[in-house]
Amino acid sequence: MNIFNLIREIEKVDPEVYERLDSRRAIFKHFAGFGKKLTAAAVPLAFGSMLNKAYGQTSTGRSVTQVLEFAYLLENLEAEFYKQAVTAASSVGAPAIAVSALTTIRDHEIAHVNFLKSALGTSAPMYTAASFDYSAKGNLTDTFTNYGTMLAVAQAFEDTGVRAYKGQAGYLVSNNEVLEAALKIHSVEARHAAHIRRMRRDAATGAVPTNKPWITGKDLGGLPALVQPVYNGEEATTQANVNIAGMMSGGVTISAAAASEAFDEPLTTEEVTAIVTPFLA
């Protein structure tokens, strides 16, 4: 993505784009600093989040501590899930390479939990396996006894995490260190999501051959309807009031599907809470 070309396209239909962006000057004040520290792949993510913030997404405001506590809950939800998944994986037919991948993801999630716990200090809530209900209040009966279901739940959690971090990033612009750490965790979650999606595609049983490493529209990718809210809103093709679908890139017209794939849409705190509540004991 050429960010400057995108800005020029936006300016054609909205001459006040710079004023809009300047109204979020706190974001751009820090952009140069943390942009240098991010990988090239992460810059479009951060920039896209800025554009959406600049275009009128209302917010009641959240403190850095509130964001960290929210992230801590989500990371514990994932960490405890993967602990149980790794224990059960071999017995439900997961190949050795899949067990290895799940183990790596588990270790990443535990590291995220430990990092957030240290950041929160004594205010960090106490979570254990008993804090979570991976049957989603009885809606899922075989989460850890069916390899396909296990991966499906993992995908839903990872896709939620990616969108959740994007939704919370705007609240962290006053703290460069926390923002940088959150974006790094976000990038790890995105890699987890892509890998789990590939594992589902390649699974010997219960495979989803059409599954891609990314989300197209609001397609569930074979997941149960229970998790549709994870994907609602991902069908968006408009960024900063510019509809990307129909634009030309390298002589090719960008389709609505491709436009929706180009950005992960943020989820609000309320949307994420509604998604994960069935998984809380």
Image (tube, rainbow, N blue to C red):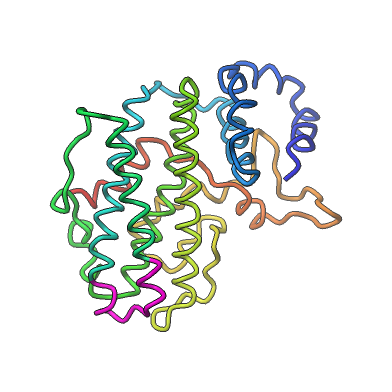
Number of dots carrying numbers: 0
Instruction: Place residue 272 in its image quadrant.
Output: top left
Horizontal relation, residue 266 to residue 241: left or right: left
**157 shown above or below 243:** below
Is residue 87 located in the magenta-colored stretch of the structure? no
Instruction: Place residue 54 in its image quadrant.
Output: top right
SS majority, magenta: helix
- 107 or 188: nearer the viewer: 107
- 159 or 110: nearer the viewer: 110
**150 shown above or below 207:** above
> Which residue reaches farthest right?
251
**80 shown above or below 118:** below
Horizontal relation, residue 21 to residue 149: left or right: right
Residue 199 rendering spot, x and y as whole percentages: 45, 71
Q: Identify the residue shown where x is 25% and y is 46%.
A: 277
* Quadrant housing the N terminus: top right
Please give the range of residues in magenta.
88-101
**80 shown above or below 95:** above
Horizontal relation, residue 139 to residue 45: left or right: left
Q: Identify the residue shown where x is 38% and y is 70%.
A: 100
Residue 205 rendering spot, x and y as whole percentages: 39, 83
- 231 or 43: nearer the viewer: 43
- 201 or 234: nearer the viewer: 201
Residue 109 rendering spot, x and y as whole percentages: 34, 51
Is residue 90 located in the magenta-colored stretch of the structure? yes
Horizontal relation, residue 108 to residue 142: left or right: right
Q: Identify the residue shown where x is 27% and y is 66%.
A: 85
Q: Identify the residue shown where x is 55% and y is 66%.
A: 212
> Which residue reaches farthest left?
130
Residue 189 rendering spot, x and y as whole percentages: 45, 51
